[in-house]
Image (spheres, coloured by chain):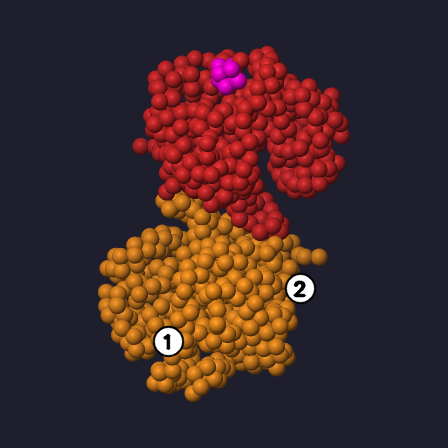
Chain colours: A orange, B red
Amino acid sequence: MMTETMQALRDLQKKLYAFQFALNVIDFDAQTVAPSESYSGRGEALEVLSSIKYSLIADPALPALLEKARGEERTEQEAAEVAELQRMYDETSKIPAQEYAAFVKLTTAAVNAWEKAKAASDFSLFAPYLEQIVAYRRRTAAYFDANKAPYDVWLDQYEKGLSMAQCDAFFDQLKAVIQPLVKEIGQRGAKIPCDFLKGTWPIEAQKMLSAAVMKLMGIDERHCVLSESEHPFTTEFYKGDVRITTHYHEDDMASNLYSVIHEGGHALYELHMADRLQYTCLSGGASMGLHESQSRLCENYLGRSLGFIKSLWPTLTELFPTQLAGVTPEAFYKAVNQCQPSLIRTEADEVTYCLHVMVRYELEKRLMDGSLAVKDLPAAWNAQMKELLGVDVPDDAHGVLQDIHWACGDLGYFPSYALGTAYGAQMMASMRKDLDVDALLEAGNWAPITGWLEERIWQYGKEKTPAQLLKNACGGEFDPKFYTDYLVEKYFAIYEL
Amino acid sequence: MMTETMQALRDLQKKLYAFQFALNVIDFDAQTVAPSESYSGRGEALEVLSSIKYSLIADPALPALLEKARGEERTEQEAAEVAELQRMYDETSKIPAQEYAAFVKLTTAAVNAWEKAKAASDFSLFAPYLEQIVAYRRRTAAYFDANKAPYDVWLDQYEKGLSMAQCDAFFDQLKAVIQPLVKEIGQRGAKIPCDFLKGTWPIEAQKMLSAAVMKLMGIDERHCVLSESEHPFTTEFYKGDVRITTHYHEDDMASNLYSVIHEGGHALYELHMADRLQYTCLSGGASMGLHESQSRLCENYLGRSLGFIKSLWPTLTELFPTQLAGVTPEAFYKAVNQCQPSLIRTEADEVTYCLHVMVRYELEKRLMDGSLAVKDLPAAWNAQMKELLGVDVPDDAHGVLQDIHWACGDLGYFPSYALGTAYGAQMMASMRKDLDVDALLEAGNWAPITGWLEERIWQYGKEKTPAQLLKNACGGEFDPKFYTDYLVEKYFAIYEL
């Protein structure tokens, strides 16, 4: 039997679930279906619902209830629920309600301004908003820990325990391998034939490919459907209803293919939370880095493997017989793994991807310590891109304005993309000790792979920390070397270095 | 300046708006996009959100606030808001919270059972739920007025002031004209050629037709989009975001065409509420009957007119050149107006439509006064269909199980369909005094027509009663003779009687 206190906390969690459900449905609808000029009424509704949700978790009576629950705790899960609710309370209640509401309004306006600025490729339209966002983040960090550097506060919020010191070391380790690798690939000038990827790929056939890929991955269509949006994303309403989106471009089939696999990875994680976590605050990915580890693991370590492409080949050649005439699975594999420094993070290959993240990390660090003014950000962006990737940025739309994150108020979020990528490589190395991954992929048999991940990671939601989950899956501490080793081995083979 | 009391009531209305927004988005998503097995988590969220919304309106402190507001009232709109909030409070608070919550759960389960029963064409799967629904409706009517017959209580809830006495008189008046008319058309045996409607109509072309029709009607795509669902419907999130749905059948283009015009009529109503009513309880159609009057007015009185078909003819023949080869607008007009007693209400022609409503009305009356048991309903349905329409019902799916309404708990709702249809005819007669409707339709010029309706009806939302709005539009009391006259004139011409 559950104690009365714990029952009260379960009721609260159910309420929080219901509000989050509503907020997620409204957001999903806005990004996939809503008419173009429907913001104002949605904004009014969101403001009311968000503020009620805020008051539920920032309830002054909650700490006493949590304290009482700690004296009564019984199961490991109940303890984790109490700890997570305490964390949510601390995080939410530390920022005064007024300031929080003002920030929600600010970011809403900022996203709107960012969209216009990106369309016009004019950073100045967005700069006034970003200035306020940076100021807010610098100021409010002190509510959490006045003795910490603001950026350390926010890194820790996105990925528990993360700091600039750790990021610096992590990124240095990556840079030491990736930059020489990119250089070597470039110097060899070995061009991989990938002109065939350019052709024309009918949207209807691409849609059939999406369905086939989801089936292959074992995504249950009774609980997960694919929609379309400008930027692909995943949102979970609950473990029985997860939505993923993609975008279709007639001249680029790989973009949809790898969007579906990436978002499909996020979806598989959410679809496999343990039933017992449903409607509690423990449902959902353990951290942003952990979530990204699963999506990038599916997209890259599984989806960009030769075995997977071989298993998909009958479908691909049936759907695109002329486009793939004379192309072999091996040639396709090399083409979708081409390494080429480029401008846009979300389209970057596996080797250069983390360099894009580092550009953002370096700039965020300087914005947060006050050494870089928002007005100087475009020039600093372009300089970083030149330094780390060796590319010239032609305009703000293809540069500093490409990502939505800063407009949403997220400063400190980007490093988790690189972290997740590296987590995933370490998990794969561990999985390979237990399973013949390549043979399974080639046979189109994903079940043992997803079962391995479900057992070690997915089922736990937020019940375990990212570090515990990583240990669960890999038997040790986080080590980025698995990732750099993977890159070197894969790309030496592809480019015959 | 608004008084403090009125400001508090506005805050409450904004909250109610936000919850209704969330509930509507969730419902719309469920009917258009959600994966098939995603009910349970949605049900949990809906239960929480509905019950919070219930407690907002059934708040014991509300009557005193409303009383205070009545002493302070200033504008006509504020008075209407107070009256509507009082009505909502009375309606909601009369049913004990526990009983209300149990009924929400019951109808949720009933809809689920109804879907399965309909698919299996087996009434017995649905009967136990309907028995509980009927019992609940019979029992709880007494909370509203213990001296009234339960069915009178519910008729009045759906359409203020409506009673069995009025319905009996109304339906008798319709029957006296419609039954002989149907008989005469049948006896003449004059078959209208409509085989061409059967052909094959590519879905993509039908989608383009939908867009063209919405444009013609003046539906602003920046505020209203068309989605797909099994049963077409309209839902409004707010006046800046209205959703309509349709369904596409390759062998039936008229079904989509008239669904879009019907739902488009509902949408136009919602899109043209006055701005000042936004986020108040006065936003939304004045009654179910009024709403249906606008959709059926658009569908039938405008959409099934020769003028409209002529204006759409260039689009129709461009999209369907082979299907409509050799067909004239006049032939098309007659084909989409063919009168033929049939099994399904939503597909009925204008003449027989109200007979379908009468079948339901007669049965509801008997269910509510206890003279008909739920178990005997299928036989009674089939007998009524034979008596009123002269058709033999082959199975429950095409009979008693065809509509969702009873599963939703709605008993007393159907008469408003007939009422709305008759309201619309009276409005058209009035409009024709001011405008050359046929010429405008033929010219594809809907703006004066929609402007006429906006000025007299749409802008007011619930600020005026249905009777006031009808008087506003028609200058007199409701009179069903406008409707029967319309039918006789139109159908005598089509069938050359």
**Residue closest to the eye, B300 or B81:** B300
Looking at the image, residue A172 sits to the left or right of residue A242; the answer is left
Establish if B247 lies above or below B290. Answer: below
- Which disc is residue A74 wearing? 2
Chain of the residue under the numbered disc 2 shown in the image? A
Residue B58, image quadrant: top right
Which residue is drawn at the image coordinates 40% and 53% (left, top)?
A: A97
User: How much space separates mark 1 and mark 2, taking CA atoms?
Assistant: 54 Å
Q: Secondary structure at mark 2?
A: loop
Q: Position of residue A470 (x, y in %)?
A: 55, 75
Residue A182, image quadrant: bottom left
Q: Position of residue B129 (x, y in %)?
A: 70, 36
Image quarter of the N terminus of chain B: top left
Establish if B468 lies above or below A78. Answer: above
**Residue closest to the eye, B282 or B211:** B211
Between discs 1 and 2, the one toward the N terminus: 2
Q: Amino acid at mark 2?
A: Arg
Q: Position of residue A360 (x, y in %)?
A: 35, 71
Q: Main secondary structure of the magenta part?
A: helix
Residue on which disc 1 sits: A340
Q: Nearer the viewer, mark 1 or mark 2?
A: 1
Span of residues in magenta? B488-496
Residues at marks 1 and 2 on the same chain: yes
Establish if A223 lies above or below B300. Answer: below
